[in-house]
Image (cartoon, rainbow, N blue to C red):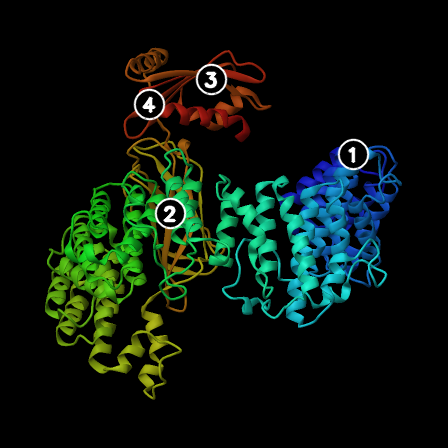
Amino acid sequence: MGPLSRETWAQRLGAFRASPSAFMAGPEGEDLGRDLLSELRSEKLSEQTKISLLALSLEYPAQLWPDATAAEAAATSLLDTLVLLPPRPSALRRPLLLAATTALVAGDALGPASEASRRLLPLLLGLASGRDLGRGFGPASEQRPLQATACECLRELESCKPGLLGGCLGLLRGLLGQEGPVQPLSLLLALALRNTLVIQARARARAGLQGLLMAGDTPSGGEPWNWALAEEGDARLQPQAPSWPAAEEECGLAVLEPTPEEARELRAAVAQLLDASYLLTPVAQAQLLWLLGWALRGLRGQTPVLFKPQLVRLLGTAQLTLLHAVLALKAAFGEALFTAQDEALLLRRLTVAAQHPALPLPAHLFHLHCLLSFPENWPLGPTGEEAAPLLLGPRLCRGLLPSLLHDPMALLARLHLLCLLCVEDEEKEEKGQDGSPRHYLEELLAGLRQRAALDGGPRASATLCFQASYLVVQCLATQPTVLTPLTHGLARLYRARPVLAPHFVDLLDRVGPELGEPLRVALRQEVVSRPGRDEALRWHLQILAEVADGKAQSATLGFLGAAAAHCTDWGLQQALLRVCRALLRAGVGGGLADLLQALARQWEDPDGRDHARLYYILLAHLAGPKLGVALGPSPAAPALASSLVAENQGFAAVLMVQEAPAPIRLSVGPHRAAGPGPVLQLHVEVLEPAYSLELRFRVEGQVYAPLGAVHVPCLCPGRPCRPLLLPLQPRRPAPTRLDVRALYTTPTGLTCHAHLPPLPVNFADLFLPFPQAPEGDKLGFFEELWDSCLPKGAESRLWCPLGPQGLEALVSRHLEPFVVVAQPPTSYHVAIRLPPDSRLLLRLEAAQEDGVPVALRTDDWAVLPLAGDYLRGLSAAV
């Protein structure tokens, strides 16, 4: 096969990026890697196209070279291509180095037995040291970029094989003092030094650290890389974030005790790196400090005094990465490196910076997080206990108190800090002073609950209120002076807005007994004291199913008895039965049996009646642990000898509604432009027989009135079913999506429910024709409608592109039922009625080959953008 063109490669790369796994499984996937390597040597492709091919190998090496053999061959081919490049400047050298390194690493082919590894490592080390430049690897203008790239490749290899460059420490130290890229060399030397120290400490071995640090260009052993040391390295030990284990023993560093000569050379190497660190970018400086901090932290008898000159420069930094690195050093070395004055200065800087009004939200959250996790020199509490820093009093952080005007994330972070202050400020809490943190906390929570209680308020306000309540419980679980008013406030919130019941259920599932028990009692009292016939009944039943227990039985049963008469639909009946199930688990007896008998007689729905009768039978015949196992079979439950209990699981499955994958396919048929209102035509197909099918539809928001259910007695695979008609009642003309649930019975007698994919309701599905215009005066009828739209409505003009079949085909396919005046093939007047009481008028005149100008008028300005999108999409639909 000959070389592929640029356009062909663009198509192949586009198809591969769209779905790499699907492309590699196809007929072209096997040859993609081989073709890519071959085309890199073709002279017909431009360098830019070749760089795009190399970028693909850098992004998807595991897909292109899935095993070590393929990766070895790919790296060898890439190195051959690199050697064959002419000496003139080329943009391919650096991508080729990166691609060869990536292929070896991703394919797990890096090792002493790999020929490509034995070629790549000397090449990278030579390029990093400047020895191979000018000898077939490009002009002098590419020297520094190639050196930097070689250092990055070596750092990647050292990260994947820790200890590989342990024998190159002295060579890298020498290179750092010469003219060359400082940042790549510094990070490479720091990583190699850190890995060498960690591996020697974990291996409990002495490998001559002084000799490694002082080695010249040709280390002892012949090769500068050390495969033996790399074999002892831990591949999972990779620098990711400036943090350390809680103790030296956890990382195995405490056993390393360097000799005085080794300690002197090590301090010299660290000082050399720190002296050049100001030339690095902030992110690189932070990583360098972390690597060196890890290295020094594990050396017994080595003080971190070498970092002290850097603190003078870094304590006043405005770079968040450097500030994070400073805090990480403080967490590692504590009072050995930071004095009490340094600690106070850091706290004040964080506090003042967090209050700056122009600070972006991510930076603001970063400063708050640093305050919440501030590493103190001498913390008073036990290790791991969350507490506010001792020097951070209420007066210092008065500007950090949360407010209802803050962003939700910032408010929660500030609230967390306020809770920690409440723990520390016990004296003011006992006195109940108005200026105490506890008093401010109660006012803030009351404000959050007041916003959440607004009828029709945003969901985010309610979510924030419950997040704040959960945070307060987590921090102040041992302070009843805070939890008691919180419990009463949440009960009042439910009284004002029962629709928040799902939030209450979630909160009860997450909090401990400190708030959970009193809140359950308060919510149960709120529910049973209310009449059971209002629109919030389903929310009351949802709360009762969560909080119902053996307490207050008479009040709970009285509420359920009053509510039963108002549970007329299946959903409310199932909610009430869930409460009965919870009472059964709690051991409620006589009154519940009477209620279940009444439900089995009163309800018309067979599913509800059968459930009530089943629960009554179980209550009458089982007691104690047997009833618990019957209601909820669990692998952890003790095995019982009763045959009734043993068979109960299958018996209950027959009478309960099971959730199952839907064997039903539902689609929208062609639009029917007739009748008083829009009707959606649905086509149903089944993969297996389904009986008593009920389709329930729900529309998100308030754009449409609630939709009724559609019933089908029987459906069988392969047997055509007449289309189902679903009347729509839009409150304003707008497209939407319908959530669909199906309830049906299987041939085995099980009742199942399933969620079906949502159905789209397009703008065109709402179109209705006007009454028949009078014969002979259709133009006058249209003009009267046209004039009636203004001045209340709106007018617009747009260009409607036409497909190859022209305007006549477009109108006959999409707009024919609504045409009032027609002068084919160039002019049409269209009148569309949009429920509930809007109209859309179109003038399509002077059609041209590629499109037609359209004048629009409507008496509802909100229809204009929908009509414009609809008309612009007609040409693609023809």
Q: Which residue is mark 2?
A: 739
Circles 2 and 3 in contact, beta carbons < 8 Å: no
Q: For the residue carrying disc 3, how many other residues have a C-alpha within 10 Å: few (<14), some (14-19), or many (20+)?
A: few
Task: Say which residue label 4 marks.
Answer: 839
First-in-chain label (2 vs 3): 2
Q: Which residue is mark 3?
A: 798
Q: Is residue 828 left or right of residue 554?
A: right
Q: Neighbour class for label 4 at 10 Å: few (<14), some, many (≥20)? A: many
Is residue 802 visible in the rendered structure shown here? yes
Between the C-alphas of marks 2 and 4, the distance is 28 Å
Q: Amino acid at mark 1?
A: Glu
Which dot, 1 or 3, sits closer to the camera? Answer: 1
**Distance (Cα) linking label 1 and label 2:** 52 Å
Give the mark nearer the N terminus: 3 vs 4.
3
Please tell me whether mark 3 sits on a helix, a strand or a loop: strand
Quarter holding residue 141: top right
Picture layout, residue 226 above or below residue 874: below
Cβ atoms at labels 1 and 2 below 8 Å apart: no
**Can residue 20 be seen?**
no
Dot 1 lies on which element?
helix
Kindly identify which residue carries mark 1.
Answer: 47
What amino acid does circle 2 point to? Asp
